[in-house]
Amino acid sequence: MTIAPARVAGAPWISAATPPSRNGAIDPGILVALDIAGVREIYRIGGAHAVAALAYGTESIARVEKSLALEEHGLLLQNLLFRRIHV
């Protein structure tokens, strides 16, 4: 849902984070939808962990310039993190 605004805004690189299922896999339907939407990187992580990893970057997750979260607590967390690191 937040990929379309990023594409319209002309974002050159779009990454997505999605939580895995209990067996550790990402639903194939989600993978297809993200591919069609133009996502270049997909991270198998969700929730507060994903927001923090995207805000600060890790060894395996690239730091992003902007973040869009779908749920209310994700929006609050991303606003706090991204203001702190001045992005």
Image (cartoon, rainbow, N blue to C red):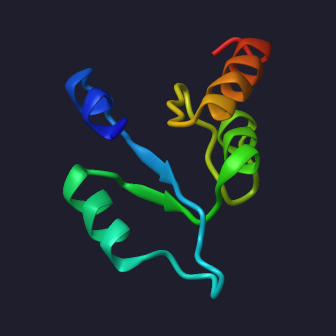
Q: Quadrant of residue 75?
A: top right
Q: Considering depth in this image, is 60 or 68 the residue closer to the camera?
A: 68
Please name the residue shown 36% across and 78% down the image. 28
Q: Is residue 65 left or right of residue 48?
A: left
Please name the residue shown 54% across and 82% down the image. 25
Residue 5 on image: x %, y %: 28, 27
Furthest residue in direction front, as rendered: 72
Q: Is residue 47 left or right of residue 42?
A: right
Furthest residue in direction right, as rendered: 84
Please name the residue shown 44% across and 57% down the image. 41
Quadrant housing the N terminus: top left
Quadrant housing the C terminus: top right
Residue 21 on image: x %, y %: 59, 77
Residue 46 on image: x %, y %: 65, 55
Please name the residue shown 19% across and 58% down the image. 36
Q: How many marks?
A: 0
Q: Considering depth in this image, is 80 or 57 the residue closer to the camera?
A: 80
Position above or below: 57 against 5? below
Position above or below: 2 against 17? above
Position above or below: 27 against 37? below
Residue 8 on image: x %, y %: 20, 25
